[in-house]
Amino acid sequence: MKILITGATGLVGTDLVKKLRERNHDVNILVRRKTGAQNEFIWNQKKGEIDESAFDGIESIIHLAGASVGKKWTENYKKELYSSRIDTAHLLFKTCKKLNLKLKSFIIASGVNYYGTYTSDEILTETDSVQHQDFLSQLSVAWENSADEFQSVAERIVWLRTAVVLSNKGGSFPLLKKLTDFNFGSAIGSGKQWMNWIHLEDLVNMYILSVENTAISGKYNAVADEIPTNKEFMQKLAKSSNKFFLPINAPAFAVKLVMGEMSEIILEGTRASNLKIKNAGFEFKYKTLNQAFEDLV
């Protein structure tokens, strides 16, 4: 299959492109600047510019582009978070319409924060609506809605609501590991907030399943089986690293002081079910934290 990928140089995209090519898929990638990578094409969503030759023969689009939520949320950066996700999706759609392209699938990243960033013992499924209005839920709703217009050009649309991605190659895990290695590992805030997570390899395989299996359609939570509290997560990470776990929690006010509004990602968290994607035939390699830490640590 010939596939076009945005965000192909990011944490998920890099591994996804490699694995798709290993499976004999023909992959084009959209980049903001030339890197010398294979089959790369330039686009600039701010200027509405895109190399239309990137779409030649394309059967599926995987839209991973989006500025990192791991930077401080100034008002200008909030606009960048929206633009890098929603404006890019609109540009892709306009180009598909202009070229009269008919896709087999359009697959888009989303966030498990769609439901709202708050702490609750409730286990949320894909049929649940937004439970708590906040910036990340509003961003995720707009992100997901940007894919709706592709129904006129794609046979099916897939949304993957992604949890924290565990990888040594980037994201939040290397920082947490470094803190633990210096024996600074501890619970954050109350420590009772739930931490949805997924191993990078499982997430990449989930995207591959979404491309190759025509029965996959709709919205899916991309989270592992075991959902620990923040305290449990940090305790297991410390134990797997043979390091101390500090019994004193990092105070919430200090985290808020340093991180601002973005601190809610760390200080709050509920649970999301992965039953739907498993019922669709997906098998997780890393179901538990111990399995993930055995690989990463």
Image: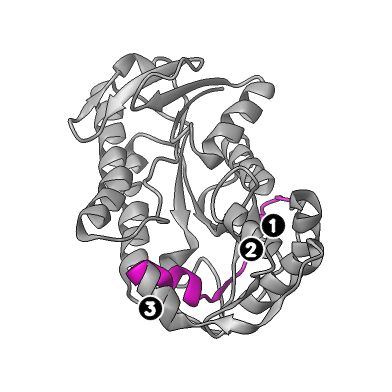
Residue 143 visible in the displayed image: yes
Q: Dot 1: few (<14), some (14–19), or many (≥20) neighbours within 10 Å?
A: few
Q: Amino acid at mark 1?
A: Lys
Q: Residue at label 3?
A: 132
Q: Which mark is residue 274?
A: 2
Q: Are marks 2 and 1 in contact (CB under 8 Å)?
A: yes
| Residue 288 in sight here | no
Q: Please provide percent x and percent y for residue 260.
A: 34, 70
Alpha-carbon neighbours of circle 2 within 10 Å: few (<14), some, or many (≥20)?
Answer: many
Q: Secondary structure at mark 2?
A: loop
Sequence order check: which comes first, mark 1 or mark 3?
A: 3
- For image coordinates 58% across by 46% down, the residue present is 216
In percent of width and height, residue 243 lies at 77, 67
Q: Is there a contact, CB below 8 Å, between mark 1 and mark 3?
A: no
* Amino acid bearing label 2: Asn
Does residue 104 sit above or below 114 in this rendering?
A: above
**Along the viewing direction, whichever of 154 and 225 lies nearer the viewer:** 225
The N terminus: image quadrant? top right
Q: Nearer the viewer, residue 97 or 251?
A: 251
- Give the percent coordinates (x, y) of residue 130: 39, 73
